[in-house]
Image (cartoon, helix red, strand yellow):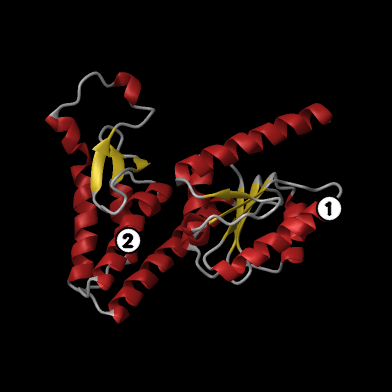
Amino acid sequence: MFRWCSYCQSFIGESEPRDDFRLTHGVCQKCRPKVRTFSEDDIRGIDPIRGFFAVLQSAVLAHERFDKDAVLAQANSLKINPADLLAGVMQPLLYEIGRLYQEGKIPAVEEHHFSLMIRELIRDIRMDLSLSDGHSESADILLACANGNFHEFGISLLELHLRKAGLQVESLCPGIPADQLIAYAKRLGVKVIGLSVSMEDQLSEVAKVARLLYEETSFRPPLIAGGFVVRASTPDISGVTLFAGSIEELVGWVVAKVQEIKQIQSVVR
């Protein structure tokens, strides 16, 4: 299930059962200190977000296209930030679309159309963020699809959450060859490189990046990889930290690692 805070209406994360794509209530860490009791009114705090999700879900079932601008406007009126919109509304909607398709309730062409609309929405959100942040010659982390991976939802979602956590993020989709990726990461001076993997044959690209980084003498940022293949199996690649946990755990790891490296660099200087 997908948990939202009943008090500030921020997305908290996923919880069991993982195959239940409904939205449910909870209390985020920021609001927890001021909560003493949990009333029925508190539980209803996420009803507007549930209603928003239900409208989108109904559009899918009725085979109706939804308007991207209207979706963004509604999210803004509910004070849902872009990261939470993708993680707590669009992600469960994508799962729901996949389930409906597998159960034969929507045809393949509709599944494709709705998935495409959500990808376009992701691009609009990322474009708006890029324009508001401006161009930067440096970044804390470089996120990229492994060369050959064209699925951008994962790194887009992670990018927004890392930005929300206060990090400078640069991302690349589709992927580029390993030597070009490292050259770009070096130019940005990143502290961490993250790769998204969707197919098993892309693991060799991850291993190639790890080998080239090992050959570097003055630039060896930690290399992390995640995605469907990592969650579905247990590959072992030397020089790579593989993540199969939640996005919250991944964001926490990246933030801690970036802070650790910055502290070390400040001492060295």
Q: In screen coordinates, is 265 left or right of 202?
A: right
Quick one: label 1 or label 2, which is nearer the N terminus? 2
Q: Going 17% across and 72% down the picture, which residue do you hit?
A: 62
Rendered-image quadrant of the C terminus: top right
Q: On screen, 175 above or below 260?
A: below
**Image x and y of residue 196, in percent:** 56, 59
Dot 2 falls on a residue whose secondary structure is helix
* Left or right of 195 on screen, residue 78: left
**Tag of residue 95:** 2
Identify the residue under disc 1: 216
Q: Is residue 186 visible?
A: yes
263 w.r.t. 191: above or below: above
**Badge 2: residue crowd in 10 Å (few <14, some 14–19, many ≥20):** some
Quadrant hosting residue 205: bottom right
Number of labels in the image equals: 2
Q: Position of residue 234 (x, y in %)?
A: 54, 55
Residue type, label 1: Glu
| Helix, strand or loop status at disc 1 | loop
How dense is the environment of label 1, judged by Cα within 10 Å: few (below 14), some, or many (20 and up)?
few
**Dividing the picture into quarters, in which one does residue 13 lie?**
top left
CA separation, marks 1 and 2?
A: 40 Å
The answer to whether residue 166 is visible is no
- Residue 115 left/right relative to 256: left
Task: Using the image as rendered, state which of residue 250 and residue 180 is in the foreground.
Answer: 250
> Which residue, as the protein is rendered here, is positioned at the far right?
217
Task: Give the residue at x 34% y 39%.
Answer: 10
What's the amino acid at mark 2? Tyr
Q: Position of residue 104 (x, y in %)?
A: 22, 75
The relative height of residue 93 versus residue 107 in the rendered view (above or below) is above
Q: Left or right: where does residue 220 sit relative to residue 30?
A: right
Residue drawn at 52 percent across, 65 percent down: 198
Quadrant of the image occupied by residue 14: top left
